[in-house]
Image (cartoon, rainbow, N blue to C red):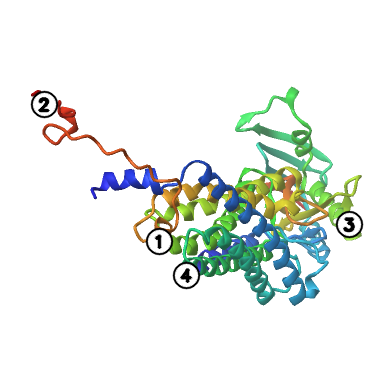
Amino acid sequence: MLVLIIACVATIGLYKLSVPAHVDADTTSISYDDYKTAFLKWQESEIYSYEITLQGGDDEITLRVAEAGTSVEVLQHLYMGEPIDESEMDEYSVELRSMTVEYMFDLVRNTLEVYERDYLTRSADETYSFLYDLDVRFDPGVGYPVYMGEQQRVTRSSGEITWREVSWLPIVVKNFKVLDDR
Amino acid sequence: MPHDERDEYIHNYRGPSGFMFWVAWLAWAAATFFAFIVGDALGKSVEAMLAPEAVGLPRALSIAQAVDAGASLNLFAAASGGLVAGVVLAVGQGLVLLPFMKRAGVLEWALATIVGRAVGWTAIYVISKQMVGLVLDKHIFGFLFLVLLLVGTGLIAGLAVGYPQSIVLYRRVQYPGRWLAVNLFGPIMAGLLIAIILFVEGENVLRDLNTGFAAAITAISTATALKDVFSMSTSRAEWLQNVRWRKERTKAPQADTVLGSTLYGPSKPSQS
């Protein structure tokens, strides 16, 4: 009996090591200083044009970016391994086509600023609370984001349990190639 | 007496059936149900007396009694609450068993019930405390993990009471493991129901009925299992001496037969 109780408690404890317990605040895997450091590295590397391959959900997209992110050319866009039908692209696939390094930095900064305001989003009838967990990783050398994802935690006033859902599909940089640096 | 004849005898005269069995069924179910409910309330009162700081705190996720979501772990208060809940259940079930088991048997039963309920209560308390702040992914794997945790908690709570009680039945009943199994239904079903409610509603909207739901299923399943207990008794079961389910029927004496066997029918009167 004691073994069963310990096994149950240990299972929950181990699970909490991989999925941290609920807190009544938004969380991020990086601080604002981490963001600034990474952004500074990116600026200092003075990369003028680059090719980037991103994976987001079932989309895989390769972009050629130049002129500080203002010129974007889609080299390849696969959906579930097949070339995408451009007439049937959804909003997510369209947004992914603009996911330059510069745009990703903007997204991360905006999100961090929202989190810093530290307000709790509640449903209209105040029975649900919505909190967010941002997970961002930067390339240690050049500083560009190599992973971005956000999850939403939903809990009710009792706080008995918190359900977590993906709010941003994770975006993974699969390949990054510098074409021209100054 | 050959085995099949003995079984037939027990079935006809000592096995449960008819009105008397249903009276016992109803008495057991009612005693178990109300003893669970009253025991839950008294156990919580004792816990509140011993750990007043936990009163008023938000509730943790629990498949039975209310557990506070506070950070402190007060095992003494929880175990005391469980002991009180166990005493109430033991008294309720013991009163129903008294006509069937001798006083020593009822005392054994009471001890097993008190220990089992206290262990089950404390286990639910500890596991519920550990589940505070649990974050689960809202898809099938998250739901299955929640089911695993809550059904696992129910399994432990059911085993805690069912196992010691089945030990008491061990020398009295041929298949005491069945008693253990029926004690699992209530808490496991409660765990499953709560997991579904949590997935759909985001919180257990029926949390005040947790104990009542588990108690109702346990009361019905164990009351129904009483039939097995009474009909599959070993010769050491007290109720074989203490209880007659119906009057023994006295068979009319058979007339003499020609060769001492009824197959040949009664002998014809001799013609003189």
Q: Which of marks 2 and 4 is in front?
A: 2
Above or below residue B120? Residue B33 is above
Query: SS class of the residue under badge 3?
Result: helix
Q: Are marks 1 and 4 in one subunit? A: yes
For marks 3 and 4, give the one nearer the viewer. Answer: 4
Are the two marked residues, 2 and 3, in contact with CB atoms closer than 8 angstroms?
Answer: no
Question: Mark 1 Cα within 10 Å, few/some/many (few <14, many 20+)?
Answer: some
Cα–Cα span, label 2 and label 4: 62 Å
**Do we see residue A177 in this rendering?**
no
Residue receiving disc 3: A113
Disc 1 vs disc 3: Cβ atoms closer than 8 Å?
no
- Pointer 3 local density, CA inside 10 Å: few below 14, some 14–19, many at least 20: few
Q: On the rendered structure, is B252 left or right of A158?
A: left
Secondary structure under badge 1?
Answer: loop
**Which residue matches tag 1?**
B170
Query: Would you name the residue on which mark 2 appears?
Result: B270
Query: Disc 3 and disc 4: Cα gap in Å?
Result: 72 Å
Amino acid type of the residue tagged 4 in the rendering: Ala
Which element carries disc 4, helix, strand or loop? helix
